[in-house]
Image: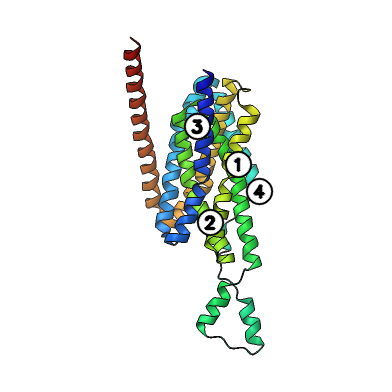
């Protein structure tokens, strides 16, 4: 029993680490493949929202209702929403698209005022050697804001995985997909400020590290110290948190980038994929159980 608990604890940390570091995938996409089309970004976010909504309403809420009852499930569901909303008020999530403006060539302007002339190649070289302090600060703010918002997401992955691996895997998948565009935002911000690909990639990875840190912190503080009842209360709150993220962030952004119908299609595809994967996992678990029973007999 203790071995199984330790294994679930390790799995929770690994899933939160992989999910969190998906920001690095977003950074690599931007730096090595260029910025994806808006439609691709929108559909990716729509897919993630479908996965999150399916997990919340098909898995988390019914399971919590079975253990703690309908009334308390509803209460903790809205508590999760309110807590995450208050977190956004205290630490507003930055919108990097408001700051991604072309690098201001301060040095070029000052040199030209002094009477020097530059051809196009020299101008580009000077631009590429500059670090714009304003854009650098913007990039740091974007990375810090995203990192702080990843902290409770790491706790959500941990709680879900410890209770049920399949559930934790689905939540980690949805959050990981959500983190990829966030990593892209950080990479674009830092690259615009420094013109250094590796510096931008480093910051996109660092912004995702708060997710496994959140999982580890929760595990160290509460692992083995909370009852099953409290775990299901937390799962209901996780459902509220994820539904809030879907309607306030993911779906709105998806519609903006890909349009209403493409967002809806991606959302439904996300739900269907998770439904099929859930059936496959159940079939695998059943066959594994039958095999172990035959071996025991």
Name the residue: 56% across, 54% down.
202
Work out how far the residue at label 1 is from the one at label 4, CA to CA, in angstroms.
12 Å
Name the residue: 66% across, 82% down.
110
Q: Secondary structure at mark 4?
A: loop
- Judge whether 128 appears above or below 294 on screen: below
What label sits on residue 91 in the rendered view? 4
Q: Secondary structure at mark 2?
A: helix
- Comparing 250 with 291, the one in front is 291
| One can see residue 21 in this view | yes
Q: Which residue is mark 3?
A: 11
What label sits on residue 151 in the rendered view? 1
State left or right for residue 36 relative to residue 13.
Answer: left
Q: Earlier in the sequence, mark 1 or mark 4?
A: 4
Q: Earlier in the sequence, mark 1 or mark 3?
A: 3
What label sits on residue 201 in the rendered view? 2
Work out how far the residue at label 2 is from the one at label 4, CA to CA, in angstroms.
24 Å
Mark 4: few/some/many CA within 10 Å (<14, 14-19, 20+): some
């Amino acid at each position: 029993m203790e071995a199984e608990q330790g294994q679930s604890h390790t799995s929770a940390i690994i899933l939160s680490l992989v999910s969190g570091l998906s920001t690095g995938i977003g950074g690599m996409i931007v730096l090595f493949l260029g910025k994806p089309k808006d439609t691709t970004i929108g559909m990716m976010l729509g897919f993630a929202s479908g996965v999150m909504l399916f997990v919340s309403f098909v898995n988390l809420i019914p399971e919590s209702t079975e253990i703690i009852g309908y009334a308390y499930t509803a209460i903790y569901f809205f508590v999760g929403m309110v807590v995450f909303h208050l977190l956004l008020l205290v630490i507003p999530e930055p919108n990097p698209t408001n700051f991604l403006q072309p690098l201001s060539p301060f040095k070029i302007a000052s040199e030209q005022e002094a009477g020097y002339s530059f051809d196009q190649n020299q101008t580009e070289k000077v631009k590429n050697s500059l670090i714009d302090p304003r854009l650098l600060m913007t990039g740091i703010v974007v990375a810090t804001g995203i990192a702080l918002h990843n902290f409770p997401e790491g706790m959500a992955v941990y709680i879900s995985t410890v209770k049920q691996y399949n559930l934790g895997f689905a939540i980690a998948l949805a959050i990981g997909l959500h983190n990829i565009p966030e990593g892209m935002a950080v990479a674009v911000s830092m690259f615009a400020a420094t013109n250094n690909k590796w510096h931008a990639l480093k910051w996109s990875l660092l912004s995702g590290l708060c997710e496994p840190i959140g999982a580890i912190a929760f595990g160290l503080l509460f692992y083995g110290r909370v009852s099953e009842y409290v775990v299901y209360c937390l799962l209901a709150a996780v459902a509220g948190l994820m539904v809030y993220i879907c309607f306030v962030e993911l779906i709105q952004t998806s519609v903006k980038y890909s349009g209403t119908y493409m967002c809806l299609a991606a959302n439904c595809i996300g739900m269907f994929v998770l439904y099929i994967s859930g059936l496959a996992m159940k079939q695998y678990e059943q066959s594994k159980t039958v095999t172990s029973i035959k071996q025991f007999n």
